[in-house]
Image: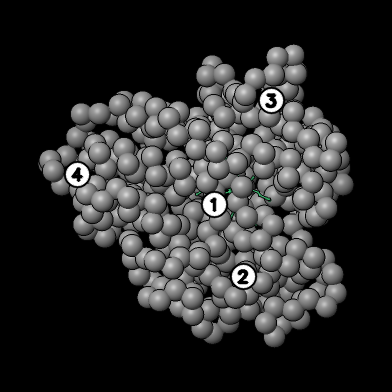
Amino acid sequence: MEIPGYREEPFEWYRKMRSENPVYREDNNVYIFKYRDVTAVLDDYRTFSSQFRDLMAPEMRRQLDELSSPSILILDPPKHTKLRNLVSRAFTPMKIASYEPEIRKITNALLDVVDGRSTFDIVKALTYPPLPVLVISKILGVPDRDMEKFKEWSDNLVRVLGFGVDMDTEREMAQYFSGLIDERKHSLSDDLISLLIRAEVDGEHLTRQEIIGFSILLLAAGNETTTNLLSNAIVTFSEHPGSFERLREERSLIPTAIEEVLRYRSPVQSTRRLVKREGGRIGDMKVEPGDFIFVYLQSANRDEDVFPNSEEFIIDRKENRHVAFGEGIHFCLGAPLARLEARVAMEELTKRYGDIRAVHVSPGGQGGQLHNVRLQEARGSGQLIQTFFQPPPEFIY
Ligand code: HEM
């Protein structure tokens, strides 16, 4: 089977697979496309494991383990449950809501840089330095002076996403966070690192290695994904004339519109699982320990059995149980933060600009994952040029 690249936005391929081969096996690889199968696999962690570090060459694994513990994303219960309970303390709705003023301040500062220009790269404006990296760094308690380093590390992590590990970056980041933990241990404050140091469930604390692993995950998980959401939103709205005007006049619709962007153009296209016990099935197909499952979230999000007019972008769609943030025990911990960042960015953009429209889309950029899109601002004669980040191939680190 030829698997199309994500740069081409393989919606047609997903549609064909849903109708002709919803569960498709090739050797040890099983590809799944229907909503019911995707959610069934993600809900059954006993059969479908996330522990990918177990598969690494022993030497590489040993080196990585010395630097940081596997993050919650690549752990199964009971370890996952314990860690997730601890780190969830830092992601309560109240805590996330308290970040809104800071996010608005950062967003406006980034947009001020390009204010008054008739032509500019709108996503670059929000991504150099990246809004999500600035936000997560502030939340973690990273000093401003280290922001450049963060941007570089985050790019390096994204570059190898799904392909391997950048050991140098992992090492540098582990050393950096270890230093930050030492600093905070002497003077705890209200940042995330301090919260993680303090966090306790049933008398257990997070180890240094665990805090480092989680901090690295946050930086990797929250950057490219949220940037993709922002750029996908702008592209999608501009493909659907009238969207921007509607959102400007009806700002309360922005959260609903963002959910529809998440469904229609999902920032994370797929994830993976590893079969770890006998007797598993997906639909009619038997799966065996050692099989890899390629879980196509984007295809599930366009499943016609679940979403009426699933290939259409409906800005005020009512029922929207999409799986863009995953499903089950690994459901995205940062979803409320990503939603908040996207809402604030859209609110500020619709305050500043009238109609924004894409006039040109072309591939390019980092790791072949970026697209350049030109946007035209209808109010004036100027053009806005936007960089369209395509989803990374897989969501594994
Ligand atoms: C639009 C933006 C985002 C999207 C689409 C997204 C998507 C996802 C998905 C699909 C998963 C589950 C992967 C799996 O089951 O294999 C996940 C997990 C996770 N995400 Fe996000 N994410 C986004 C933003 C963020 C942000 C901003 C953060 C943190 C600051 C974050 C932190 C995490 C963490 C910690 C996990 C692992 C949860 C666990 O394993 O229990 N994500 N995300």
Which residue occupies 26% across, 60% down? 240
Badge number at residue 150: none
- Answer whether residue 274 is visible to the viewer in this image: no
Which is more N-terminal, label 3 or label 4? 3
Which is more N-terminal, label 2 or label 1? 2
Q: CA distance from mark 4 to mark 3?
A: 42 Å
Q: Considering only vertical position in the picture, is 233 above or below 314?
A: above
From the image, tell me which residue sits under label 4.
354
Q: CA distance from mark 4 to mark 2?
A: 39 Å
From the image, tell me which residue sits under label 2.
38
Q: Amino acid at mark 2?
A: Val
Q: Considering only vertical position in the picture, is 46 above or below 344?
A: below
Which is more N-terminal, label 2 or label 3? 2
- Quarter of the image where one finds residue 140: top right
Q: Amino acid at mark 4?
A: Gly
Image location (x, y in percent) of residue 243? 26, 56
Which is more N-terminal, label 1 or label 3? 3
Which is more N-terminal, label 2 or label 4? 2
From the image, tell me which residue sits under label 1.
392
Which residue occupies 50% across, 45% down? 338
Which residue occupies 39% across, 27% down? 105
Secondary structure under the numbered disc 2 in the rendered image: helix
Q: Horizontal placement of 304 versus 384: left or right?
A: right
